[in-house]
């Protein structure tokens, strides 16, 4: 039950945050303040495409969507697998590094949409 409530709270907070950004026509806070696309630029559009089962569109907007979602799920649920906590932490860090490397490649090659 605690895990279910945790999910609901996270989804609600993210929903409110994204709605507030859309309402004030800000978009990405990182890009708004720095002028540089953030490491997760395209993530929302990618997630929406993924929910519509448009895998090619999802990959186009944000190629690291599946690894990033996997890392988030692992990080949020690591308490369910105490025996594998160290492996989960390592996996999450490796995925975070991969996300950053792909971000740099996309940024310097002009692939960020």
Image (cartoon, rainbow, N blue to C red):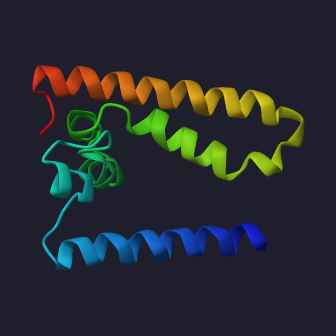
Residue at 55%, 39% in the rendered image: 70
Q: Nearer the viewer, residue 37 or 4?
A: 37
Count of picture labels:
0
Residue 2: x, y in percent?
77, 72
Res 89 quadrant in image: top right
Residue at 32%, 24% in the rendered image: 102
Residue 6: x, y in percent?
66, 70
Q: Nearer the viewer, residue 90 or 69?
A: 90
Residue at 68%, 75% in the rendered image: 5
- 7 on left or right of 24: right
Q: Compared with residue 30, is residue 104 higher up or lower down, i.e. above or below? A: above
- 55 on left or right of 90: left
Residue 92: x, y in percent?
60, 33
Residue 112: x, y in percent?
15, 35
Res 99 quadrant in image: top left
Quadrant the C terminus occupies: top left
């Amino acid at each position: 039950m605690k895990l279910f409530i945790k999910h609901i709270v996270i989804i609600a907070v993210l929903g409110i945050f994204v709605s507030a950004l859309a309402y004030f026509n800000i978009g990405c806070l990182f890009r708004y303040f720095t002028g540089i696309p953030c490491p997760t630029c395209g993530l929302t559009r990618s997630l929406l495409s993924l929910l519509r089962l448009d895998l090619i569109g999802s990959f186009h907007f944000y190629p690291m969507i599946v690894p990033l979602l996997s890392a988030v799920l692992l990080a949020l649920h690591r308490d369910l697998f105490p025996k594998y906590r160290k492996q989960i932490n390592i996996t999450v860090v490796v995925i975070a590094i991969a996300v950053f490397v792909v971000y740099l490649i996309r940024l310097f090659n002009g692939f960020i949409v």
